[in-house]
Every structure is written in structure tokens, then in C-alpha cells.
Amino acid sequence: AQSVTQPDIHITVSEGASLELRCNYSYGATPYLFWYVQSPGQGLQLLLKYFSGDTLVQGIKGFEAEFKRSQSSFNLRKPSVHWSDAAEYFCAVAAGDMRFGAGTRLTVKP
Amino acid sequence: NAGVTQTPKFQVLKTGQSMTLQCAQDMNHNSMYWYRQDPGMGLRLIYYSASEGTTDKGEVPNGYNVSRLNKREFSLRLESAAPSQTSVYFCASSEAPTSGSTDTQYFGPGTRLTVL
């Protein structure tokens, strides 16, 4: 079965700094990959997804992610973080059903 | 267009009590899902319904039952609640089953359940 690992439980960055959230997956074929964001007390909102084609995927709110097959990774990036980006971020892989990582909580320092 | 709605938002139960969590979507989606979210574990699929009239077990189905009442509604029932079922429950829907498709899942706001 597929699985997802998000190695960082909690990350703190300063406002305006760049951000990279890591995601590694385990699956035998090319999976469908997703990044979701969850603001406090809210449901999950899709940031972006990858299923084929260009390995650099653009999403909403200025986020992008790069699929690297050789590293089984799908890291999320943003060049300049805003205070409103503070939230929990989930990577997910879909292959039969959706499997989520444990999440990375992002804190943004003023 | 409300998207995915869930009721109730909060619930406290005693061990052994039963309850049903309700979920409805107004996007005419075929597939619906129930997840639980626990600290440090992300979301885990309890049950899903790929289409009206079908339901299938997910990763953690024990202690739960589901009903796909119609295309819009998908309920989750706890027959005899246990403290291990204390969690936040999310309902989601997608146009088609995730398997073999790239359809986005749209999530409701969640139900926070505490079992004493």
C-alpha cells in the first residue's frame, strides 16, 4: 500500500522568508500527489496536485511543488511566506484510496 | 452553494452511547468519504462511497458503520462509542473515485467528537 512521510512536524519561518515543506511517498508506480492546507478549526483545502506532465506544479496562494521521481519526493515551496500562511499542511498520495501524511505545522514569525 | 456540510460541529458522548454524524454535499459529486484526524497521524480513511448505493471500508473501519442515503448524503454511525473514537471527523466528496482519477476531494468543516 502507498504511504506518505512528512519528516518535519513543526516548522517556524520569518515572514518574507522562503519555505520548503518536505514530502516523501512510497508507491510502486507514479502516484497522484496532492498538497492540502488546513487553517485552525477548518477543513482541508487543496493547494495543488500532480498527476502527470510537468514536474513543477503551480498552486493557489503562490505555492508550487516539484515532483522528483528519483527521490520519491513532492516538496512544497513558497518564495516569500505571509503571516496568513500559518496553518497545517498535508501531503497526500492517491492510489486506490487517499493516504495522508501526518502533517507539518507552519508557524510564521513577524 | 454550501459545498460540504457536516452536523454537528461538536459532540460529547459517554462510553457506549451511539450517534450518527451527518454529511451532505451540494456539488452533485458521485463519491463521498469519511476520515478521522488524530494528532500526529494525519487523516485516515474510515469508509467511502464511490457512488450512490455502494460503500467500502477504508483504513480504519472498525467500530463504524455508514449509509449512503442518496447522492447528496453520507452518514457515519458509531453504535457503541469508545474513548479511542475521540477524534475530529471530516467528510469529503469528489466528482469521481480517487482511484484512477485526479479528482480533488472537497472537505467539510469537521465534527469534533469527545467520548468520555
Image: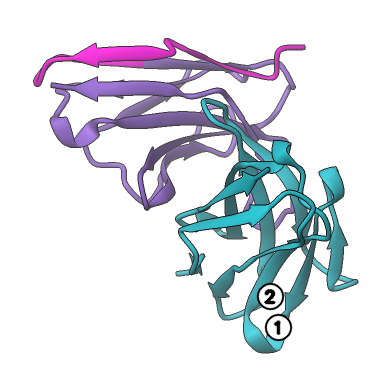
Q: Are marks 2 and 1 in contact (CB under 8 Å)?
A: yes
Quadrant containing the N terminus of chain A in the rendered view? bottom left
Seen in the picture, residue A23 relative to A70 is either above or below; the reply is above
Relative to B104, is B8 on the left or the right? left
Tell me the purple chain.
B
Could you tell me if residue B78 is visible in this image? Answer: no
Rendered residue at 57%/81% (across/down)? A28
As helix, strand or loop, the secondary structure at mark 1 comes to helix
Quadrant in the picture for residue A83 = top right
Relative to B103, is A1 on the left or the right? left
Residue carrying label 2: A30
Tell me the cyan chain.
A
Seen in the picture, residue B10 relative to A59 is either above or below; the reply is above
Q: What's the magenta region?
A: B1-20
Relative to B32, is B86 on the left or the right? left
Residue carrying label 1: A69
Separation of residues labelled 2 and 1 (CA atoms): 8 Å
Q: Do labels 2 and 1 share a chain?
A: yes
Rendered residue at 17%/24% (across/down)? B81
The disc numbered 2 marks a residue on which chain?
A
Question: Within 10 angstroms of label 1, few (less than 14), some, or many (20 or more) residues?
Answer: few
- Identify residue type, mark 2: Thr
